[in-house]
Image: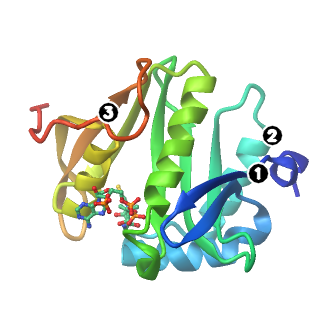
């Protein structure tokens, strides 16, 4: 198991009724995380191997090319959600490659905790722009991202399959200022 994963510092933040902690995802987290991924994304879920391979690749990459983290309940160790980012092909920019929260733990601030962590991580890495893609019909995720300061920047037609659907491309600039609570624009740009 990569040492970096085990030694990653945790973060305590108020998250709904209980406290949640962010730490780096470890290989031992792959079974519960992939079960949560299946609950979040059904047929589109990443297979277990994808998490494993990415964890190993991220741990070996020099310089760092991305990371995966989990939010956990510190006393029970229950995993509440997960998030991943990867350096984009464009220098100085990153992509949110995955985020999911256990269905029974949603609307308790876990997603916000995870994404706020990612935003801080990006700032520390000197990343100027964070990108993501989201299914056009995923209204809850789009509302969530807007709440976290992302703006719609464009759309890729028929990007997703089964059902065929456009991806909305959203971005957040990492200008100095508050990380959480910046109102996002409601409108979509055109690609
Ligand atoms: C999107 C997701 C990660 C959000 O996680 P969460 O822990 O429920 O989000 P939070 O509780 O931190 O929400 C923060 C804010 O985002 C907004 N928000 C979150 N879910 C929302 C929803 N379903 N409808 C409208 N706004 C929502 C709200 O403003 C919320 O603040 P509030 O609860 O004080 O009103 C979660 O719904 C999820 O796992 N969805 C399935 C997987 C998915 O679609 N991932 C994104 C793929 S691109």
The residue carrying mark 3 is: 171
From what the image shows, is residue 98 above or below residue 125? below
Q: In which quarter of the image is residue 117?
A: top right
Quarter in which the N terminus is drawn? bottom right
Q: Which labelled disc corresponds to residue 101? A: none
Residue at the spot 75% in from the left edge and 76% down from the top edge: 75
Which of the two residues, 188 or 116, is positioned nearer the viewer here?
Answer: 116
Quarter holding the C terminus is top left
- From mark 2 to mark 1, how far is it between C-alphas? 6 Å
Real-space Cα separation, disc 3 to disc 1, in angstroms? 27 Å
Disc 2 secondary structure class: helix
User: Which SS class for mark 1?
Assistant: helix
Residue 150 percent location from the top left of the image: 30, 37
Q: Which of marks 3 and 2 is nearer the N terminus?
A: 2
Q: Is residue 4 above or below residue 172?
A: below
Q: Are marks 2 and 1 in contact (CB under 8 Å)?
A: yes
Does the CB distance between marks 3 and 1 fall below 8 Å?
no
Badge 1: how crowded within 10 Å, few (<14), some, or many (20+)? some
Q: Position of residue 161 (x, y in %)?
A: 25, 63
In the rendering, at what x and y percent does residue 74 appear?
72, 69
Q: Does the residue labelled 3 lie within 8 Å of ligand 1?
A: no
Check contact, mark 3 vs mark 2: CB within 8 A: no
Residue appearing at x 72%, y 45% in the figure: 57
Alpha carbons under labels 3 and 2: distance apart? 28 Å
The residue pinned by badge 2 equals 60
- The residue depicted at 61 percent of the width and 62 percent of the height is 71
Image position of 170 (left or right of 121): left
Residue with the mark numbered 1 = 56
- Residue at the image position 43 percent from the left and 34 percent from the top: 179
Q: Taking 25 as reference, is 50 left or right?
A: left
Q: Does the residue labelled 2 lie within 8 Å of ligand 1?
A: no
């Amino acid at each position: 198991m990569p040492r970096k994963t085990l030694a990653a510092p945790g973060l305590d933040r108020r998250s709904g009724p209980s406290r949640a902690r962010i730490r780096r995802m470890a290989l031992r987290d792959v079974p519960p995380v992939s079960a949560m991924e299946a609950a979040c994304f059904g047929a589109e879920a990443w297979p277990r191997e994808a998490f494993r391979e990415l964890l190993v690749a991220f741990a070996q990459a020099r310089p760092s090319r991305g990371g995966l983290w989990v939010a956990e309940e510190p006393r029970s160790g229950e995993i509440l959600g997960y998030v991943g980012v990867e350096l984009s092909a464009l220098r100085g920019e990153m992509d949110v490659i995955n985020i999911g929260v256990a269905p029974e733990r949603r609307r308790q601030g876990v997603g916000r905790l995870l994404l706020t962590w990612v935003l801080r991580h990006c700032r520390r890495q000197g990343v100027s722009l964070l990108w993501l893609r989201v299914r056009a019909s995923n209204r809850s995720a789009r509302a969530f991202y807007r709440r976290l300061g992302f703006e719609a920047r464009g759309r890729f037609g028929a990007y997703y399959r089964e059902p065929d659907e456009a991806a909305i491309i959203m971005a957040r600039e990492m200008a100095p200022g508050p990380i959480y609570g910046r109102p996002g624009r409601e409108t979509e740009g055109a690609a």
